[in-house]
Amino acid sequence: MNRPILTGICIVGIMALAALAAPLISPYQPAQIDAGSILCAPSSAHLLGTDSLGRDVLSRLIYGARISLSVGMIAVGISTLLGVVFGSLSGFYGGSVDAFIMRCVDVMLCFPAFFLILAAVAFLDSSILNIMIIIGLTSWMGPARLVRAEIMALKEREFVEAARASGAGSLRIIVRHILPNACGPLLVNATLAVAGAILLESGLSFLGLGVQPPVPSWGNMLTEAKATLGVAWWITVFPGGAIFLAIIGFNFIAEGIRKELG
Amino acid sequence: MNMGKYILRRFAGIIPLLFGISLLSFAVINLAPGKPGALENSLNPRISARALERLEKLYELDKPVYERYWHWLKRTAVLDFGRSFSDNRPVIEKIAERLPVTITINLLSLFLIFAAAIPLGVRCALRPDGILDKVMTAAMFFLFAIPTFWLALLLMNFFGINLRWLPVSGITSLNYEYLSPAGKAVDIFRHLFLPVTVSSLGGIAAMARYMRSSMIEALAQPYIRMARAKGLTERSVLYKHAFRNAVMPLITIMGLSLPGLVGGSVIFESVFAIPGAGRLFYEAVMMRDYPLIMAEVVIVSLLTMTANLLADLSYAWIDPRLRDKR
Amino acid sequence: MSGPLLSVRDLSVTFGRGAGEVAAARGVSFDIGRGETLVMAGESGSGKTVTSLAICGLLPEGVASVSGSALFDGEELIGMPPERLRSFRGGRIAYIFQEPSSFLNPVYSIGEQIAEAVRLHRGAGRAAALREAVKLLEMSGISDAQRAARSYPHQLSGGMNQRAAISMALACKPELLVADEPTTSLDMTTEAEIIGLLMRLKQEMRFSLLFITHNLAIAERIADKVAVMFKGELVENRKKDELFACPEHAHTRELLAAYEKVGRF
């Protein structure tokens, strides 16, 4: 366990725990409006201050962690799964299957992810589930290429021949022999992708197209920050800081895994 | 020598790409759960039955999907994207007037990224694990993780409001018309300073790291030893031989990072209230202005594809090995 | 001018520092006379390459420390300031290496790279240098020299690349050519051609040759003297005939046993 991994796991771990234990540790309800304490600076009553509706920033931050972390993980779960499937098909069968899938990858890479996601959100409603699915559907290209490269590299190697000789079917060969080799890079890619997904969701929510208020998301807390610029620095600093920390945490983990792989 | 053939081959490879882009774009618009007319209907309750009928005809909802696609494709090929829902102006006009701003800012960012990242990366590579390298690596790591819109807000808060050094919105001041040419230039510069800086910081971080590892790898190559054995000055060895090889992969990476930059435009144009194509897209999405949304998606992806193509071609131009490959 | 061209005394090369120190070469001493061919034989890791690189200061600075003496035409190379040393490299002492394709820059044409050497040491202009490059390629036995000059390393075979490397090395009429396993990665026929080319050019241009190899068969054909390296030390250094007649060191005998026939040249 090297230092980057430990640091990263600490950061992410704390956030995850806070998210899980939100009802227990959150000082206020996230939607609790208190007209008397609008835009209060951080104080003993409200550790991180309040927003323009008098809601406690800290509590909203904690509940926001639930959204961000879950969107990140599930979206990446989807994209990794898709990527593994397509990459495996591409790498193993080669030929026209490979050509077709790689063309699809090229086409998808021509669309800025954000544009595609925004367009999709315009046409469907912006439920959290939809956001997860859409982010997942637009990020499978990376893992696909990884898996494909790994399979192509290992396809001709002896142990695959040996497995085939002993009668193993293609699927079995892929799953048991080749994919485990791809695990390392896939894990690095997935970890970085979670950070990316969190960033995407925050961006979407910031623009008002992701998680809708009053459900707190770090991104939509920052929407308010734009309106209160110069007046309430805590609304800018803390939610944004949370996003930043989450990204750093996952980046550390990815860096650590990369180091372990050598 | 083989450059011509390579160019032809690449262009031929675009056709399936164009096809795919058009398919995907068309598929996205047909995600709309209700009929396109339904939204206009709900926006304007006094819409008559005749008007509804005309709308249905317009969107050819009575025709099968492939016919719709074909007609849409034909119209798109001549850049006829229909009219915007919000003000009934031709979509292509609205985009054309906003696109230059976005392109300018992105190009400036790209330029800044390269101008800053390349020297930094090379410097770090020449003294790996030196003080500068360690500081830079740490700084890059953090810079890379900062969400652009957060950084934008923070900087706006700090420079724009607290210090009042820089303007925080738009690309020109109110009194722009009355300024001298020099004054105009300065005004635009002051307005663009924050947006361009913010959008480049992440890119600088990433590119500097790439440059560093690419340079280190290049310096470890056997031909560097040969170059030294020939008696070349260290400067020649570094820049004529190592750097030339090291910088090549960065060109493709630049092409690949373009979608990210353009995608980012949406957010920070909104933050900085810049009248660009990104913000136009955002407004279109908010208002469910479908023709505009569609057009932007297609245009942006075409531009991205072109940028990738250019990056590929220039890579082939500078790396002779690629021209002969399959 | 009398006396040996290159006189190496007690050359030692160490890598690393402190506890992790590794002596790649220890107390190596030998002479190369003018017009003489010294074949340095040994297995990989025996220190032959390191020794040859150390002479011209081609080992990475921070990593390797070199001690001892290397007198080239009366001047001490070890510890010479880098700018001065650079004038020796390529101009008076030239190198060719094992895998020519890797040792040539992939993004410049062969002609450009040879011309670079010409311009550096003979101060010619660009066009003149390129013309000279073509002539040099012809001298190295390449038939379509114009075309080769415009080609890139990846477009030529290993043999042709090595000829190009030889042209590059001899562009400035060096007094000493160091050839570090130049034919090891070539097939037997090409190997014979290259060795033949080297010996012919050596006779015409009258340079000294330090030929590094693990194959004593080559030594038998071309050497005046043979030096055997074993684990960083020079264990034998004698005239060729004497060495082959009665080899002293055990390792020499091992090398003799691993004799790989060389084609006719």
Image (cartoon, coloured by chain):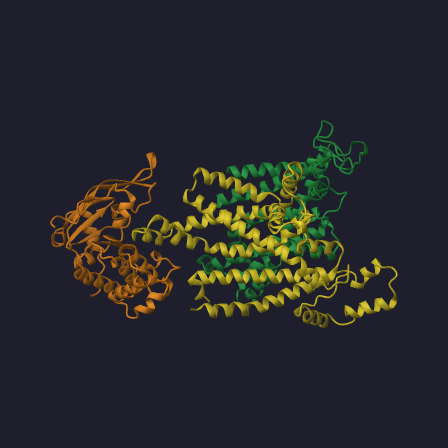
Chain colours: A green, B yellow, C orange
x and y percent of residue C161 in the render? 31, 62
Q: Is residue C226 visible?
A: yes
**Would residue B40 appear left or right of C162 to someone viewing this image?**
right
Q: How many marks?
A: 0
Q: Is residue A162 left or right of residue B26?
A: left
Picture coordinates of residue C105 (x, y %)?
A: 37, 57
Q: Position of residue B100 (x, y in %)?
A: 63, 58
Image side of residue C47 versus residue B132, left or right: left
Of residues B230 and C118, which is closer to you in this image?
C118
Looking at the image, the residue that sits furthest to the top is A44
Relative height, residue C143 to residue B207 (above, below) = below
* Residue B258 point in image, percent of width and height: 57, 55
Write down the quadrant of residue C68 in the picture: top left
Residue at (88%, 61%) from the top-left corner? B46
Residue closest to the eye, B113 or C214: B113
* Residue B35 appears in the rendering: no
